[in-house]
Amino acid sequence: MVIQVGGTDNFSFSVDVEENLQYLMLHGYWKDASVSDEFHRYNRQSIEHLKPGFITLVDISEIEAPSVEVIQEIVKTYSQRIVSE
């Protein structure tokens, strides 16, 4: 059974607890890293439903390619949050 965890206009998270899968759908255009706080929160919430060794499937078919600078900013911000926990 797939559970919708949450998201924004830019992404959504859901999980299949029985299959131990996390689904991430990316949408629209990410103009900056402002989405990273909510992204991190919903990612953590979805992981709480899963067991270690889960698989994440990412659907990027609906995202508009952001600039390299935005990607670097998002990765940096997200990585710092994971390390600090």
Image (tube, grey):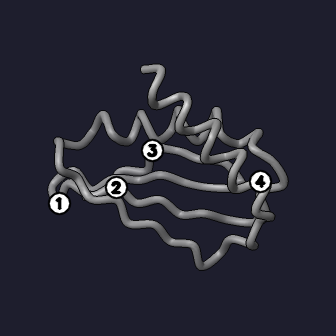
- Tell me if 41 is positioned left or right of 1 in this view: right
Q: Which residue is at the front of the view, 33 or 68? A: 68
Q: Which residue is at the front of the view, 37 or 16? A: 37
Residue drawn where x is 27% and y is 56% of the image:
16
Residue 48 sits above or below residue 31 on the image? above
Residue 22: mark in rendering: 2
- Tell me if 10 is positioned left or right of 83 in this view: right
Query: In the picture, residue 36 is in which quadrant?
Result: top right
- Disc 4, disc 2: CB below 8 Å? no
Residue 19: mark in rendering: 1
The x and y percentages for residue 55 are 27, 59
Q: Earlier in the sequence, mark 3 or mark 4?
A: 3
Circle 1: residue type: Glu
Q: CA distance from mark 4 to mark 2?
A: 24 Å
Q: Quadrant of the C terminus?
A: top left
Q: Secondary structure at mark 4?
A: helix
Q: Earlier in the sequence, mark 4 or mark 2?
A: 2
- Tell me if 74 is positioned left or right of 23 in this view: right
Mark 3, residue position? 5
The residue sitting at the top extreme is: 85
The x and y percentages for residue 45 are 41, 34
* Number of the front mark, 2 or 3: 2
Mark 4, residue position? 70
At label 2, counting other C-alpha atoms closer than 10 Å, the crowd grade (few under 14, some 14-19, many 20 or more) is many
Query: In the picture, residue 10 is in which quadrant?
Result: bottom right
Residue drawn where x is 67% and y is 65% of the image:
27
- Tell me if 15 is positioned left or right of 73 in this view: left
- Disc 2, disc 3: CB below 8 Å? no
Residue 6 sits above or below residue 59 on the image? above
